[in-house]
Structure formats: structure tokens, C-alpha cells
Image: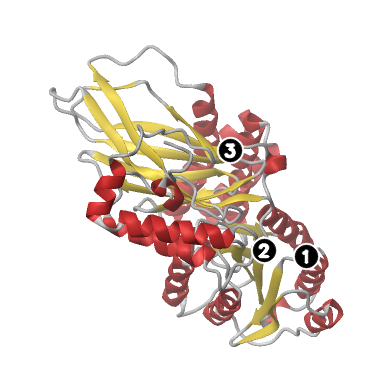
Amino acid sequence: MPASRPDYYAILGIFRDATQEEIKRSYFDAAQRLHPDKNVAAGETELFLEIQQAYEVLSNPKRRSLYDATLPPEVHANTVVKHEILFSRPNLIKLDEPQLVYMLLEVSPRTEKESIPAPPLNICLVLDRSTSMQGDKMDMVKGTAIQLLRSLRPEDVFSVVSFSDHAEVVIPASLNSDRKKQEAKIQMMQPSGATEIYNGLNAGMQEVLRTRDPSRINHIILLTDGHTYGDEAECLKLAEEAAAQNIGISGMGIGHEWNDIFLDALAGKTGGSSAYISNPKDIQRLLVDKFNALVATYADDVLLEFKEQEHIRINYAFRMQPEGGPIATESPMRLGPILRDTPLHVLFEFVVEPLSSADDVVTLLNGSLKISMAASPVPAPPIRLNLKREVHVNPSPDPPPARIMTALSRLTLYRLQDRARAAADANQFDQAARHLHNLATHLLSKGEHSLAKTALFEAENLEKMHAWSAGGNKDIKYHTRALLLGGMKEKAA
């Protein structure tokens, strides 16, 4: 294409066969990001005008057809990220029963991390201040909030909301406010009341929305130590609204009373995950780690859109890194962020129903990856995925790739505890104990003696008491999750 002829599809971040609805949606997203009323950075007004021109051409079928006739062949190389896909087997087998196939997806920055600008933040801390937070927990929360406040860059927006059975905006979202006054307001927080998470989340959402900017990392960090009652559905609906606005949510639970299943689901709707803080002294480390990860964000979310294939089901998806956690399998799937120094790794489990003798090639996945990048003023090009496997009569003698085997080995630990928990929830305590004994055997083989001892202790509790110890199921769940993440980092190093 001549240098004077812009690529309107690249400007809008869409494929050349995009539908009119996709063109319209991409235009509105880009226009919101670059509108002159919100952006005064050099060059962004010109980009906004280019986006308008691209939309005017591509939204008109006649003008689009004439424009398409001038285009050179499409280049599929993505200039923003690179991706790699590994399968557990080179081919499928003609069987009259279901078979499993695993796929490991890696998405990482294509450019050197030193050249990637760190986007500014728009962060809200939503802090539980119910009565149960009194003492060391509240002291650590206050101290860490002040530490984060002091570490802000001039371009960062920061807000704090506290909640119990009602919410209070402790620090409104703002730039370059009086830090001393803000620290004093944090110090004045006092525990009281019950835990109603929706009140805090809703107030935090409003603060982020007030200063929401697509060129920032817009994120809510929720920290709680208890269950919320009666407002779970409202919280999950709010998380869906946050995801639609590209606002992330991270959940952190202190102690053993909070609902990890709920926090996983809440954060997962935005591509996030939950974290377990077993001891108040760990509040500072985990909050600071989360804050640093947000600062190091390259792409704030990777969205997988796909069409369901006949005889194929995505049975399970798990983000191995940078933030380990299960992913809901309906389209679109929010896979999570890419960090400057930590690629995104997701492991998929496909169930392939019995294949007919006429099937020589099977499509496992047909869709696209869409990359959301706050650091980039223009949309990132999407990545088309059309993943196929040949069908043979006999299995291949080739072993699975080593990285797939490592990922599966690590994930086995997590899924064993998952099965133990499901069995215990169904009052099948002997079966739950067997899963934990199996988990302990695997852990011992990997040298994880302390966690193996915890698994055996919980197995005995389930057999004798028909109950977990306080925090026992969370200890095993989040420690096996941490092991899984650690294994992937070793391979990525």
C-alpha cells in the first residue's frame, strides 16, 4: 500500500472481513479513547480524525468496496504482540468415545519491554472496615494504603472507599491532591458494622468512572475478610458492567471467613483473580505486589471471541500466569493481562466427541484474540485463530511438548484440590479424602513436604470430622495455585 494510503482496518483494529456491527463498535471504542475533549496529547487529535475518516469509508458499503479494491494482500503478522500455541498431541484419533486435547496459549509483547511506556493508573482501593477488621488487619490496611499513596506517580489517579453496611469515599479520585490530608483521612478509618460488599464495590466503581480514561489502567482492588449476604448477584452484575467499561477488579480475602468462590467469580468476570491473605502481616506484600503488577501492565486484557464448533467443547480453561485462576469458558473469554516481563499463559482442555470415519480434519477453535492496550492510542490489531487437528487411525508416537507436560503436571495439583472440595461439598467425605491423599503423594514427589502435610491433615479432618479445618481448603487451594504459577515462571525465565 502506498505510504499516502492509510490502512483503515488497522486504524480501527479490525479484520478486513469485519461486519458492520464490529466496525461500529471499534469506531466508538477508538473515538472514546481519542476524543479531543478528553485528550490533549500531541498527535492524538490527528489520530482521532483518521479514525473518523476510517469509519466514514468502512461504514459505507459502496465506499468500502472501492477502498478494498485498492488494498494489497493482507499481512497477518501482529506488530504489537506475538503468540505461540502448543498442543498435547499432534493429531486426533478416530474413536467411538470422547477424547481430550490440551492447548497452551502464550501471548507476549513483541517489542522490548524497555521501549514500552508504562500507562498511568486510575486505581480505587475498596477496603472492608467491618467490625471483624479491627486490630492488626486494619492497621496493616491503613499502613499499606498510605505506602501506595506515597508511591504514586504524578500522572496516577488514586481513590479509597471504605465499607461495612454502608460505603464512604475516604479519598475521592483525583490527581496531585494534598497527600498529607489524604494520609490523615486514611488514618481516621475505624472498624464498625457488618460486611456488605456491593455498597463498597458500587462506590468504588463510581470513583473509577469519574476519572475513567481508556489510556489509563482502570482498576478496583477489593479487600475483605468476610462473607457478604444477599447482594452477590448485584456484585456480579456490577462486575459485568465494569468489564464492559474495561475496568478490572481484583479480590483479596483476609483470613478464612470470606467466600473465595464468590471472589473468584467476581474478579474473573473482568479478567482478574482472587488472592488469599492468611496472615495480616502479608497484606502489605500482596497489595504492593498487585500495585506493581498494574504499573507493569503491557496489555490490560486479552479477549478471546470464538464460535462453538460441532462435537467440540472447551471443558476447562486456566490462566497459568501472570495471575493464576480459572476462566469462564463462554465466549467472549477474558483471559487476563499481559505484563511487560510476564507473558500471558492459558491452558485449555478440549473435549472432542466421537468422530465419524469421514472426519479427516477437525476445527478445535475458530475465533480471534483482541488485545486491550491502555499504552497505545490506537487499537491493537486482532489475531485470528483457526486451530485444526488432523484425524488419524492410530495415535502419534511423538510425546507431548515438555512445556505442555509441565503445565499439566502443575495444574493436576490444583484440580485435585478442586475435586476434593467438590466431593466434600457433596458430603462425599471419603472420596474427598482420597483426592487429598493423591494430592499429597504428588506434592511429596515434587518436594513440597509442608503442603503435603497440610493435605494429609485435611484428609484426616474430612474422614473423622466431616469438615475442613478453619482455612484449610483455602490454604491448599491458593498454595497449589501459587505452585502452578511458580512453575510457569521458571519455564518463561
Cα–Cα gap, marks 2 and 3: 42 Å
Q: In which quarter of the image is the N terminus?
A: top left
Label 1 neighbour load within 10 Å: few <14, some 14-19, many 20+: some
Identify the amino acid type marked 1: Leu
- Which residue, given by chain and number where applicable, does mark 1 sit on? 152
Q: Is residue 435 visible?
A: yes
Residue 209 position in % (x across, y down): 55, 75
Contact (Cβ within 8 Å) of mark 2 with mark 1: yes
Q: Can residue 255 be seen in this view?
A: no
Identify the amino acid type marked 2: Leu
Considering only vertical position in the picture, is 178 above or below 90?
below
Residue shown at 52%/79% (left/top)?
198
- Which residue, given by chain and number where applicable, does mark 3 sit on? 440
The earlier-in-sequence mark between 3 and 1 is 1
Residue 230 position in % (x across, y down): 45, 80
Q: Nearer the viewer, residue 139 or 86?
A: 86
- Which residue, given by chain and number where applicable, does mark 2 sit on? 121
Considering only vertical position in the picture, is 243 above or below 178?
above
